[in-house]
Image (tube, helix red, strand yellow):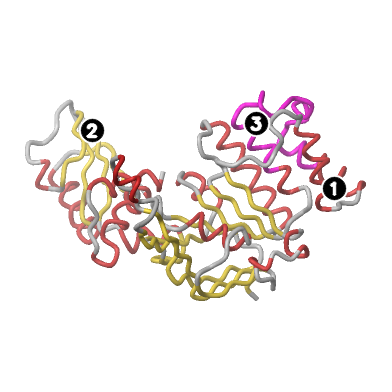
Amino acid sequence: MAIIEIHGLAKSYRVYQKKEGLLASLSGLWRREYREVHAVRGIDLAVEQGEFVAFLGPNGAGKTTTLKLLSGVIHPTAGTAQVMGFVPWKRENAYRRRFALVMGQKNQLWWDLPAQESFRLHQQIYRIDPASFARTRDELVDLLDVRRLLAQPVRELSLGERMKMELIAALLHSPEVLFLDEPTIGLDVVAQHNIQRFLRHYQQLRQITILLTSHYMKDVVALCRRVVIIAHGEVVYDGSLAGITDRFSDHKIVSLQFSGDSLPPNLANYGEVLEANPPKARLRVSRAVVPVILSRLLAEQTIEDVSVEDQPLEEVIAAMFLTIKGQNQPPADAAAALSASR
């Protein structure tokens, strides 16, 4: 049975179009022009209990809006959704005690207080039994190795340390569903790895359901087996990570190391040359002809080493955003799509 069920979920906004100039601003006091923005357009989605699902898309695709709808922060324009049998935007207390939302760009901890004081506040808000609170807090603190930081004001913590505290605060009441909106945004590589390791361990330990949005494909590869991709507010892909490459990539990357100190003069005859640093080279080769090209290379050239890899996942997703449903986007959107997939 699905723990999250969404049918035809949609959210639209009216956005005021402010014109440039003093006179235009004054006229806007009496007559305003609005633009309709469709943040989410009829999403259908089902998530089973215990799944760790990545929710991806370019900037403005509707990812955060969807998480806000499922958290009950905002009301939909159309459609239905149920999480653990609750309608999120009814905001029932019984539902609030069973889910958590962590937003990488928003703080839920008191800035000038030590994190342990905010934890005590959460205990009172969620009415957590003192023994359960102490046991859960200590478990999370030890898993994230932040006990030495509990008495330090939140404003003095690094970004990575602060995110660890945010996760602890979100998990103190042992939610069954966790919504994560870019939890590793702005973190360095070490901090990202620590957060990924904790989330993977905690999800396997508690078997909670997690819906994750992230701009870092390393988060997705490390944590999620299932990927849901939305663009223009609609689901355009729902499946495995491997399936993205199989469906949307039409070539592979062939890395070669030739014998000697030079490259063959006819290297471009085997594929598009991406890199040429004698005696090594990288070629882009159509997936359909990779076996034929490899046979030719081995027959015609002296090769010391060869490897064949799929196109980098972030490139596949960026290209997918440009070509899905035959809608080409301008270069600025392409850059945004690539940024969103990193």
Q: Is residue 140 in the magenta section?
A: yes
Residue 67: where, in percent of width, then height?
Answer: 56, 58
Residue type pointed to by label 3? Glu
Q: For the residue carrying disc 1, how many other residues have a C-alpha within 10 Å: few (<14), some (14-19), or many (20+)?
A: few
Residues at marks 2 and 3, CA–CA distance in whole angstroms: 42 Å
Picture quadrant where residue 1 is located: bottom right
Q: Which mark is residue 280?
A: 2
Assign a secondary structure to mark 3.
helix
Query: In this rendering, which labeled residue sits more in front, label 2 or label 1?
Result: 1
* The one of 129 and 295 positioned closer to us in this rendering: 129
Residue type pointed to by label 1? Gln
Q: Is residue 67 left or right of residue 29?
A: right
Residues at marks 1 and 3, CA–CA distance in whole angstroms: 24 Å
Q: Is residue 183 left or right of residue 38?
A: right
Query: In this rendering, which labeled residue sits more in front, label 1 or label 3?
Result: 1
Q: Quadrant of the C terminus?
A: top left
Assign a secondary structure to mark 2.
strand
In the figure, 155 relative to 68: above or below? above
The residue under the point 56% across, 75% down is: 80
The residue under the point 81% across, 53% down is: 126
Q: Is residue 166 left or right of residue 132?
A: left
The residue under the point 51% across, 32% down is: 189
- Identify residue for label 1: 124
Query: In this rendering, which labeled residue sits more in front, label 2 or label 3?
Result: 3
